[in-house]
Each structure stands twice: as structure tokens, then as C-alpha cells.
Image (cartoon, rainbow, N blue to C red):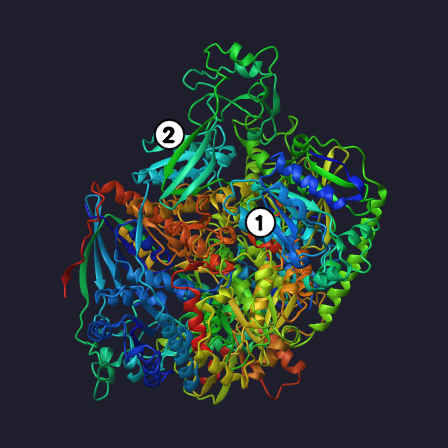
Amino acid sequence: MPSSALVIGGGIAGIQAALDIADAGFHVFLVEKEPSIGGRMSQLDKTFPTLDCSACILTPKMVDVSRHPDIELLTYSEVIDVKRNGSSFRAIVRKKPRYVDITKCTGCGSCAEACRLRGRIADTFNAGMGKRAAIYVPFPQAVPLKYTVDPTKCVFVTRGVCGKTQVCKEACKAEAIDFSQKEELVEVEAAAIVAATGFDPFNAALKPELGYGVYPNVITSLQFERLSSASGPTAGKILLNGKEPEEIAFVQCVGSRDETTGNLYCSRVCCMVTAKHAHLAKEKIHHAKVTVFYADVRAFGKGFEEFYDRVRAEGVRYQRGYVSEIYQRGDKLVVRAEDTLIGKPTETSADMVVLGIGLVPRPETNQVAGLLGLENSSDGFLAEAHPKMRPVDTAVDGVYLAGCVQGPKDIPDTVAHAKAAAAATIVRLRQQTTDHRLQRTDVRVLTT
Amino acid sequence: MRPRIGVYICHCGLNIANTVDVDAVGEFARALPNVIVARHYTYMCSDPGQGLITKDIGDLGLTHVVVASCSPRMHEPTFRGAIQKAGLNPYCLEMANIREQCSWIHADRALATAKAMDLVASAVAKAGWLVPLQERQVGVTQAALIIGGGLAGLQAALDIANAGFQAFLVEKGAYLGGRAAQLNTTFPTLERVSDLLTCLIQSINDHPNIRVLTNAQVEKVDGFVGNFRVSVLERPPRVDAGKCTACGKCADACPVSLPDEFNAGLSSRHAIYPLPPSSETRTFAIDDQACTFVQDRICQPEPRCVAVCPENAIDLSLEERTRELAVGAIIVATGAATFDPRGKPELGWGVYPNVITSLQFERLADVNGPTGGRIEIDGKEPKEVVFIQCVGSRDQTTGNLYCSRICCMVSAKQAHLIKEKYPDARVTAFYADVRTFGKGHEEFYDRVRKEGIRYRRGYVSEVYRRGDKIVVRAEDTLMQKPVEVTADLVVLGIGQSPRPETNEVASLLGLTRSGDGFLAESHPKLRPVDTMVDGVFLAGTCQGPKDIVDTLAQARAAASSALAPLCRGQVKVESATSYVNEELCAGCGLCAATCAYGALTLSERTRRIKVNPVLCKGCGACEAACPSKAIQVMQSTPKQILSQIAALS
Amino acid sequence: MIDTEALVEQFGLTACIQCGKCTGGCPVSPKSALNPRALVYQMLRGEGFELVSREELWDCTTCSTCGLRCPKGVKAVDLIIGLRGQWIESGKIPTTLRAPLTATLNQGNPLVLPREDRSLWADGLNVKNVAEGADVAMFVCCENAYDPRVQPMPRALVNLLRAAQVDFGTLGLEEQCCGSEIRRLGESGLYEYLRDDNLDKFRQAGIQKMVTTSPHCMNVFKNEYAGAGFTVEHYTQMLARLIAEGKIKFSKRMETVVTYQDPCFLGKQNGIYDEPRAVLKSIPGVKFVDMDRSRERSVCCEGGGGRMWLEGTNNKVRLANDRVAQALETGAKVLATACPFCFLTLSDAVIATGHENDLRVMDILQIANEAL
Amino acid sequence: MTLRGLWQVQGGDTLGAVRDLLQVLLEDKVVDAVLVPVKGSNHSVMPALVKNPTRLTLADPFAPVMAFNSARLLSMVTRGGAGAKIGAVLRSCEIRALVELSKFNQVDLDDVVIIGMDCLGTLRVPDYLRTAEERLDLTADLLAGAKEGNTDGLDLRTACRMCEVSTPPRADVSIGFIGIDNAQSLLVEMREDIAQELQFAPEQSPSERRAAVLARLRATRAAARDAEIDQFRTCTRGQGGLARYFAECLECTNCMNACPICYCKECFFRTANAERTPRDLLRLANRQGALPMPVDALLFQMTRLNHMATSCVGCGMCEAACPHDIPLTAMFRAVGARVQKIFDYEPGRALEERPPFMEFKREELLEIGEPQH
């Protein structure tokens, strides 16, 4: 019986679950499909309501993962098959080719400096607001700090030629770049699996009346995070086209509590995300007129209501009423809504509109469910074994849920949920392992 | 012997080298006192980079190493490992953070280079004073104490026990289940709580690894992570559960009568009373506080319960006793209190019998409750029911600024129950924001509105009587009109408050409270169940309001944290602890008063301060407090710090 | 006094969370007392409701933005129509409405014109009756049939269908009002009569496929005639298909800039955005530009919901005037649309705002026909 | 329980009566030794630890001079357990210092029997010596004036002129002579058990005159105190105010050595840790152009102030010890008054009160933003 666990997803939930399981002395395979662990939390600027810098509190945990002797990190990898083997599992993991030998790569960045597509590829980490090269690290604090060739963008990968010479390869002193890399299938054996594949932000273009994708100054809350982040495309300045907005409108419940999008549920975080953003906007642009359009303010967590009180005291105006439409008039946006508390339709002008987008299941959620034999709940997230009593167990023995894959959650709730999944995993591993000494399994290479 | 220091400057690829002139910094470092060698390299953390350092230690006989690179959080362990391999004590390393603190945050190359030089000079100045330290581990008692037998405590105990460790579950009251035992149905799933709870309690009672101590209270906690010693005061089971047939003759005979807090005061009970049905055994228990015989040996003419019991199951002469437990971890699951609605006198609770709290509603709706599940006041079915939200939450006048997180859904569920039992009843809910944020909650809110529950936006200002009706007055803020709604049942959605005994729990364990009065976690985002005290964890509503599912998740999270030391069997303790120069120590005790971790004690014999290195976190508060610097923290001694400062001036 | 409870139940108003998205999106709410959210709330309060002095109920254009935007699936527009119905039932029918309603009953059209004049639009075209056997029935619409300003539209369609060699016919004098606007005025009895009568006629004529010139007719047939038993398309859908199949080819160039007003009944309510644009873009020489507020974000011209015949409470500037201004902003010379109501309201607006020389309002049918 | 009554003075020899009392305490083994000011050669009066009752003949606790705050001496005698009862004849400021030291575990009060004396104030040692030489019997003068609380003709130290506490704040045996006819009797108050041991039977309650005299004294002293504090604040106002105040400080540490509270075994400023290397000094001089020396005088004084402000009892020993007569008492009392007010703490008031640094009260945190609970 292997005393190993497989954690799928390297966001904060996966990180926390992996750390807890490993801290209890068991071996963990942590599989992340992106080049770096960190997940959504790594994209955030500050966290509510304490306004801690997200990276400052997350990076140490990421480093802990990379340094933990009992955690084996498989980044840029995907679980493609899971088979039950008695009471344990055999999972096949596809290690996608990075075209970079991570044992050699020093993370120096010379390759990206040299890349012909440098500064020309929309940077997904910055929610499309910055530009990067075809060989990249998602962010400077990436773990592992190893470069990856974007196979969908790299000219050499897509067309087979890149000018006369491969400039990245020439620039790399460590000789780490290797375009001959192929995907690799490896097998891992684990007695328990924690699914922590997270969520996707709601695609705001599905609410056409809000003008996302039409007006460049209508952005999502995730984009605001990047704008506000000191390591973001504007170095933390709230700028659109180089201009500081004077009037900012925040729109709540974009893609949540909304039949028209099929998402009936509340996304749980957006109210506080917006309160935080409104605070940051006021902090960075003192004279800014900031209006939040809402229907119910859900500031329910520890210290949340107090924070909501604080941002109102800072002069952020809350107007009750969902936003009906956004359109342009002159060089300003007009936000139309009814102020339901005075019973009148209003037009509020804005230089920037931030859409409080909800959390939706990732497209891969169903794939994971299929692999593991899990079910979806009606909201599309994965179903727990019992909605009250067993929030991390699933219908499948030995498979547990951690974090937003089960439903929207803020960071502390995600961490608590992930730790709960870890507890379930530890219990299982302890029960199954007669001899509690570490019997780690190794990754078995199937193909190269 | 003078220290022989090697300085190693990392380019971090371009991360540092782009902004800092590493060549110049190397040049500068070479000229600093005691520096034998200074080198720079693209990636110091890489194997060849580490090789440079280990080779120099061997060849040049370095005694201390300074690495100027990233944050020590990142690579201090790497470089400590490297110099250890070369035979140096790992603590003879000092890092200068010229990336996060310099190259990443500055643009001007000349100024950044100057700052990097300062940081290196400062690190070199300190490095010479570094002393070798030893890493230490202590053993762990592989058992855990769980304080509180509510839902959180039960779940945490079960996880600990299932993982193969002894769990001691200490419950102050006579039965397990806590607040959940009082609840009728769950939201949004509408399952009977008692069914769920009985299941859980049964697995607790049956578990070979769990020792349940009811009627017990933790009196004293000594020790530290892995090695706590706990004194528990146990009140005796005055009713022998093996003999008691729950015939109830004793209660009939008991002269004492008091409001039954289990039924939220809706009924009364005697000093000897039956345990709630969710507890596994049907038996009676004695309320020591209420029993006049236990308290004062008075019960005229003699304890009647003892006399009438046909089974001779009652023994009032038993004495309390103290039990000593040794555990490696402690989980605090002491729960929350409900808000006392007398704090909002304008709502008429306690004045009008048909103004009840949401907890009282739960008891009314429970088939085992005082009305057998009939939601009735004075035997009358309610026709007009009003739910009032945020009673004692989000309210400066009560001092509770926070949202209690559950009341919106509790009211929605209760409104649904009313509609289910009395489809013709007119049900109104007054609210300001409906906070149905959990999984399936918004959908449930949609459902109850469709069932005909009318939500009106506006907090209720007053509740008063007109004729035989209760009038609820509020502003309907969506119409901007004051409204009066008549009601024959008003349900106050009361919030959760910190328990009044939170301070005692906190001081017992050395915990702190957050602004809202609940127990404070060590980090609100990433460490929601850990506390400032190693080995002590929080589960459930003692940390803040929570519904059942969040409570359970958090309880399991606390179990997960507690399982780490239990599974490992060993805990690492801080190496850089404080130490006392006994020559200088005047034994005044200022430092001990300042220490948040209880690591310092005044020795009666020597009249000097003693450091318990297992408890010491190396925070340095003692060092700041000591007027003569008789207590110092290793690796942050005044000599080291003053040298650093001097190098900068 | 109205039984609000019944309305709450009938229209599922309890789903409402009073977010105001309906009123905020309502095109007339800024200039009228009409507030769909507050209306719903008054129903929910259940304290009774007086129709008297609620003239603003007649301001609704039934564009349905309120219902489409609602996150909880409440259709405020249906409530408004329901309230209008109660108003009509009470017999206190607004004077301007009496003539159109009576005429629809008697003459089959709300324009108060004789039934026997219904085919005048097709003079000299020799359009056969669908009863003679045809693949497609063409439904003309009262407005197109009688109003000389829009009579060219069905004529153009005839021309286009013939060019594409489509076998079609009309109901001739048998055609009568589809009832869409009648229903929206709250006269549900008359609507139901028209519906049943029409369905009988359609069955008798053996109609399998229908094309309409007005989106309003299409909408009512498609979505509100229960069990119609035939398929219905708007002409823009048919034309787009015929063009794509190469059955219609344009020989003339139209060197001009065209923009397009999405009719609410075609766009928002039925999601037909691409076909009209495809038709316009296929015409040689046409440079197509969209207005800022287009497709899902388009704004009503204020022609629907009986607003063609009613004055209501808001005599302020019509929405069509705004649309004309917005069309001019794009630099367009032609403001195309695909609905007789839109055509008429926009044409009036062009005149009212004095832009006759700057902007020409045209139906897509006209444009396509001219380019043939 | 304490008993209170008059102790008869035989033949107007007030001093003799006190000596008798001390002798009885020693002989009845209430105490094993007495720490009491004793006359020496050259009129000097210094504390002595008297074991043999016959050596009490030169004791003079009335002499208006205080060369040393005896609290510090008691720390030396009792710390860690003397194993004997020490009777200590102390003035108010000495008792208060003793209480403070006890809080810092620097004295073992179990071994001390406090014999508290009324105090009208003391002279600087040189002034006392000079005056004693001229007038011979200052003790008699003082006792005569004490009847009305009069100190005319006595050039009291600043600290004493500012001192509002003329009676012992706590004592096992206290001896009062202010505001009564001290040629007839002394006002004595003692612990019941001691009284029994001594067979001290209280006779008469004290006169109202004493209360009035003490109140008047308190008022005068408080006014003087406020004036001194005001003057200090005026002097040190503005930039460089404190530097001017300490311009003459040599960093000789006499003040520290004289202070009864300053209990560190070795001052951090006297350790190698705090030493400035020549390199450091030259670099600082280089940066500032001219480096005022001694470099850390102000830092030294501020640190002492920081360490002592909450516990300073205002005995003025620091000022008395200063070779350059820097008015340290006013500074300590001015700053102390403010700090003590913040924490509602009065040094020497009660043994149970913990010094502010040793205790965290929630209300104190309100200012830094913690909500009330």
C-alpha cells in the first residue's frame, strides 16, 4: 500500500492540501497544468479585508511546496487517466513538453529577452493586459522558476522555423532549450486523490449589455487586480490608456445570481473583492468618484462587514440596483441603473467600469469528474458527498475535493476546505498504511 | 580569532544584475573588514553557484558566509545546507536581500547599486558576530485534546481518532452535540439535524480511540506543542446511566424548577432532567448548579430524587475530581453564544410572548421540542409571521459590527417551514441585504420567494402591540415609505456572539481575541485554524460565526493541522531562541511579563530568568524589554544589530 | 382595486429580488413614470393597487428589455401587459385606442381601413393566393399592407422572392392582423379571437412555411401562437439564406455607408442579429457600420406595444430621435431597419430632427431590392 | 490591623523617644537589625545597619539630610533572602522606591519591617554640613518647625520642595511628628502584632491640627511642583531643547548610581556592546562636521528616562549626585507625571499595581485601533 496522495491542481487549495498531507509525513504528488503553481491567488494584488499583499503571503507557501522533501511537483502536467487499483489509484500524468530542460534552466530570462515575439503575446497572467514573449515564466515568483515555451505561439513550434536561427536557444547559456522534447507519460500510484482544480472567472462578454469587449475601459475585477498590482502591467497605477480614471463604477453580480447566464448561485467573493477594489481605487486616486452598484452586499466573513463599513466611510458610494446597460456618451461611459432606493432610473458617468465577475466551474471540471467518477452538483461544480456533513468527501472512496472546485470560496474558506480535504486524506492514509513509516512511491515513466 | 568572511553576490539571472552593478558590489565587498573573498555569479543557488561557496570554505578557511541574493525565505535553507556540507555551522550564514529589497523595487542603477552595497556591508558587519546554533527536535505525545463537544469538536475528534490517535473530548455540559442538538432542520437541504448528529455522536461513542469527558472543564494547561499537560475538572455522573431507565420519577420529585435553556427558555425543567434525544443514551442528568443539595446540601427534607428512584441510580455524594491528561495538540471548539435579544429592547422580545428568537423557533419546530413540533404560541396557529433580520449583527448599538453569516438562511428556512405547515400564512421577512452566499443558498432563497415569502427591504425599527396584534414597524426602503405590518408571530434572526467565557478560554491557552471578540486565528487568510500558540488550533464558531458545513470544514482543517505533529511524532523547535546572561540578569521579570509565549520564568532559586527554548519563538520582545540587555536572542544580539547599524551610518 | 396576489402568482413575481435591472434597462423609464421594478414591488406588497392615474402603463413599448435582463427570470413586461388587460377589461379604454381596437375586430386591421383594401399594396404584382398552393406563405402585416409609406416593402419582397425563384403566395384579403400589438395592448379577448381565426385560416390554406415582413408578426406566430403547425421566418433570415445559397445576386452597387437599427422583436427578443447584417454586407459597395449601441445593446425605437397609436404620458422626445442622432454619429448615410414600426418612427424622427438630407431611413427590403 | 496612638516623649527629648522605640524593637526581637541614619564625624548623617541596641545612641532619623536613598541599600541587604528581619527607618520617598523595587523583584519585603517617618524635606549634603556647622542642632530646629509644618530657614532640595508626600505611604511602624506637639509625644501607628509584642497601648487619637498642617503642606508643595514642571517644559521647548538641557552632561553615570530604582547589575551603556569604535566616531564626525562629545550623553539620559519614568518616585538623588547640577528631578517628574497619568499608575502607591511595562490592559490598545470587547 503506497502512502502517497495525488493532489490535482496547484492553486492555494492544492498547495495547502499538499503541505498538510506532506507535513503529516506522507508523500504527495502535486500535479499542476500551468508552468507554475500559484493558481488564481497569484494573480491577486491585495487580499480582503486585511489588505495583505497576496504574493507576499502566497509565495512563501509556494516556496515551502518546492522545498518540501515529501512533495513531488509535476508542473505543466495533466492527469489523463485514473484507474482504481484495489483501494488505491494508478494515475497517468501527461508531462507536456516545455521545450526547456528544467534541470538546466536557471530562470535567468535571457531566452525571453531574445525571443522574436518578445512583448507581442497577450499575457494571460495579466488577464490580457500585458505582453510577454513566446518563452516565458508566468510571473517572477513562479515555482518552479523555469521557462516554458508557449507551444501555441512559438513560431518554431507552430511552423518549424524561426528566422535563420533559434534566438532563444542561442541566448541560453545553460543550454536548457530543447525543441526535441516530447510529451511524457508517467504513472503515479496514490492511495488518495485530492481534486483542487479551482474555478474560472466568468466570461463577462456573456453579458453583452455591459459592454465588456466593446469598450476598453470596461474591465473585469481580475483585470483590476492586475492593474492594481505593483508587479502588474502598470506597476500598480490605475491607468487605462495612460490616463487615471476620475469616475469609477463597480458592477456587482456579473454572472452570478443570474438566470440569464445559467449561474443561479452567489459567487461569494465578488462583494468583498469589489469593496477592496473600491478601497484601492480611493487610496490610489483620492479624488476619484467611486460608485458601487449592488443588490445585496454580502460582507459575511470575519472582518468583512467592518471592511464594508470602512470603505463607505472612505467615501465610496453604494447605489442599490443592478446595472442594466453601459454605453458611451462622448468620451465617458454611461452606467445605467435604477436607484431602487429612490425608485428612479439613473445615469452615472464613468471613466472606468469594473465588472465584479463571478466564479464559474472550469471547463476541465467535467473532465476531472469523468476521470475520477465524480458527479456535478446542479451549479456545475463538483458534488460533495453530503452538502452539510461531508463537504470534502465525494461519492468515490478515497477522492476528496478541495477549494473552489466544489463551489465558490474566498481564500480562508478555501484554505480551511483544503485542510479539511487533507485531514480526510491523512486519515485514509493512516488507516490504509499498517506500517506508518513512509513508503513513498516513485513516478514511473511510461513513455518518453 | 578574527572571522573570515566570504561574500557571494547573485545576479539572479537578470533580476538583480539588470539593476545592480554586481561587479561594483563585489569590489566594494572585498574591501570590507574581515572579508577574505567576494564573488558574483549568475545563479548562486544553482549547483555551480553553491560549489563556489563550498570550495572557498575548504580552500580559504572561511568562518562565515554572506550571500547577497533573494529573500532568505526563498534560499536561506539552500545556502545553509551548502555551507553545512562544507563543514560550517548552518547558522553562520547571513543573507542580504538585494532582490526584493533592492533590484525589484528600484529603477535607478546607481542608487540601487549603492543600496546593495549598504545591504552587503550591513550583512557583513553582522556576519562576523554570528554564532553556531543547533537544530533541535522534541518528541510528541500522540494524543489530542478537543475542548467542546459541539459539532466542530465531534468532527475534529473523529478525524484525530480515525487517524489512529487518542482523542480526549472534553465537554462542559452533560451531553454532546452542542448548539446543533437544539436545531431542527438544516438549510438548504431540510434534513433533520438530530438524524445527522446522532450518527456522528454514535461513531464518537463507539470509537476506541476517543475518550469523552462530559461535565468536564479544562482547568489548567501547561507545556508546549507536542507536550501539553492538561488538568481537567470532572464533575461526577451523579446518575448511573447503566441503571437509569429514564422513568422520570426523579424529575417529578425535584423541587427545583428553572427555564430549560435547551428549549431556549420555552419550557422549564428540574435540576434533574432528561438529556436531549440526540445524545445516545436515554438517561437523566443532574444540573449541579441548580441542584440545591449539590450546591448547599439543602433539599427538604432529603434529596427526594434519590429516594424516589426505583433503580437506585442517583448518588449525590460523589465528589468532583481532577484528571491529568498528556496531549500533543489541542483543538479549541468552544462554540459561540447566541445574541441576547434584550440588547435590542425596541424589538419587544421578553415583552410579547409572540416575539421569539430564531433559536426558539427551532425548538418550536422540533418534534421533540416543547410543543411537539407545532409552531404555535399559546396554542394558536400563526397567520401572519414576520421575520426580522440582523438582530444583533451588523449593529454598532450592540457592539457587534460583524455579519453573523447564518441568519439570512436560518430565516429563509424557517419561513419555508411556516409556509409548509401553514400555506395560508402571510410571511414577511425584513432585511437590508440578503446574504445567501453558500452552495445552494441563493437557489433556496429563490425557492422560498416563489413559495410566497415576501421580502421587504428595511430594518425593523420597532415592534409594539395594538389590540391583540403585534405591529412591526419599518421603512420599506424600496418604496421609501414607513410601513406597519401586523403579526401574530415575530421571529428575530439573532446573530452569533462570542461566548461570555471566551476570555477565560483565551487566557487558559494563551490565545488572543480578534476585534469582533471571537478567538483570533494566526493569519486571517492563510492560517484560519492555527493560533499564535503552536499546537493549539481553532475549530468552528469559537473563531467566528459559521454554518454547519463551514464549521465541519474548519473542524477538519483544525484536525489536519493537529495531525501534522501527531503523525510526525516530533516537532522542530526554534533554534534562534533567547538566552539569559545570568551575570547581568537582575531577575526583575520585565521580560517574562512581555513574553507572549510563556517561555520565560523567574527561577525562585537563582532569582534569574530561565528560558524554555521549546516555547521561545525568538521574537525578541524580551530583549527589547530588558533594561540591561541581560536577555538576548541568538542571531539578533545587540552586538549584531548595532554592528549592522554602524555599517550603515 | 386590483387583485395583486393573483398577478403575483400569474407572473411569478415572487422570484423578484428588487435589483432594479428592469427599470434601469427600460428605454422609457428615464422620461416616464414607468418603473417596472416598483410595479412588481407594489404587486408583492399586496396592499392593493389602483389603475387610475397609472397612465404610464401605456408608455411601455413592450421591447422586453426588462424581462431579458432580469437575473431571476421575471418578465415585468408581461405584468404590464396584464395590468393593461385589467384596464381594458374595466372598460375604461383610452380614447385613442378605441378606434384601432374596434377596427381590428371589424376590419382586421388597427389602421381603421377597409378589409377589402388589404391587397392594394400588391396592385399589378399578380401575387397568387397561397391557397392555390405555394411553398411559402408571405405574411404582409397591416402596417405594410395599408400604410403607403411602407407599402414598398412587401412589393420589394415580392420582387426579391421572384428573383430567387421562390414559390410563394399571400393570404390576400384573408390576411388580417396577427394580434401581436393587440395582445400587448392588453386586449387579450380580441387577440385570442384573432389567433384562433388566423390559425384556422392558415390551416385551411395549408401553410407549412411562412415568411413575414414584420418582426412583430413573426414573433407572435413563432412564440405565442401555440400549436401553429408551420415554421415562420422573418424575411431577413430568408434573404440571408437565399443570398448565401447564391439564389439572389446583386447587380447594382450602392456606394454608401449603412448602419442598422435592430428591431427589438427581431433582435433582443428572438436573437436575430447576424442575418440582417449579412444581407446588408452582401450588397456591393455598402460599407456597414454598427452603432455603438447595437445587437443585444440596441435601443427601442418606441414603436411597439401599441405605441404607434398611443400618446401615453410621455410626450417628450421620442427614443427614435436619439437613435437617429446615434446613427449620424457613425457617419452613416443610410439607417437601415427591418421592421415597419422602426421604419416609421425613425423616418418621423429624421424629419423631426431636420436630418432629411443627411440620413435616409430604409428597410433592408428596399436596399436589397434597389441593388438587384 | 494597625493600632494608632501617642508615644510619650520624656523631657522634650523627641529624638530620644525615637531611639527608645527603635531600641525596644531590637530588644523585643521584632527586628534583628535596624537600618537607620546615624550621625558620624563631621556632622555627617549616613545610614547604618545597627545590630547592637547600644549603638542607637547616635541614630538621628530626623536630621534633614538624605545622602542616600535607603531603598537601594535594602535591596542590597535583603535581595535573595536576608534570613533576618531588618527594620528600616525610611522617609516617604524611600518607602515608595522600596515598593517599586519590590515589584521588580529587587527587594524581599518579607524580610523588611518598614519604620516610616514623617518627612518635611532634606537639604543637599554640602548645605546640611555647612548649616550644621553653623547652627549645631538642625534636628531641634526641624522638630520645632514641624509643629506648624514650617521649614523656614531650611534650604531644602528642589526634590523636597516639590514633594507632596510628607507622611509614610505604607509602614509597619510609622512615626509622625508633623502638626503635633512633638516635644510631648510622637504619633505612632503600628501593626497589631508588633504592638502586642511591644505592649504598646494606644492612648489618644491625633489632633485635627495635624490634618490641617499636612493639607497646607501638600498644597504648597504641589504648587512648587507645578512651577518646576512648567519651567522644565519651557526650558526644553523647541528644537534642541533637551540637548541644551543636557549640554553639560558628562555621562558620568552618577545619577544612575544614586537612583534607587535603576537596578540593572550592569548598565548596557557601560558594556562593550555600546562602545563606539574610533572608526564609528570618526565616520560620525565626518558626517556631521563636528561631533558633540560625549556622543551618547543624550541617548543615555533618554534611555534612563525611558526605563525609569514610570517608576520614578521623585527622591531627587540623581540631581543631588550630578556634578554639574543638571536639574534632573524636574525632568523626571515632568515626564513621569505624563506617562503615569496615561497608565493611571502612581509609583509606590500600592504593591499590587503592576508597572505599566509588565501589564497590558485592553483599554490601552484602543488607541491603536482595537475595538472594545
Q: In which quarter of the image is residue A328?
A: bottom right
Residue B27 percent location from the top left of the image? 32, 85
Residue A372 percent location from the top left of the image? 27, 51
The answer to whether one can see residue C162 in this image is yes
The local secondary structure at tag 2 comes to helix
Which one is nearer the viewer's eye here, B465 or C356?
A: B465
Q: Quadrant of residue D307?
A: bottom right
For label 2, the crowd category at 10 Å Cα-Cα, with few meaning under 14, some 14 to 19 and many 20 or more, is some
Residue receiving disc 2? B205
Distance from disc 1 to disc 2, alpha carbons, whole Å, reads: 62 Å
Which chain is home to disc 1? D
Q: In which quarter of the image is residue B39?
A: bottom left
Residue contact between numbered discs 1 and 2, judged by CB atoms under 8 Å: no
Residue receiving disc 1? D74
Image: D119 above or below D243: above
Which one is nearer the viewer's eye here, A67 or A267?
A: A67
Asked if marks 1 and 2 fall on the same chain, the answer is no
Residue type at numbered disc 1: Leu
Residue type at numbered disc 2: Asn
Residue B201 percent location from the top left of the image? 40, 32
In this rendering, position of residue B518 left or right of residue B278: right
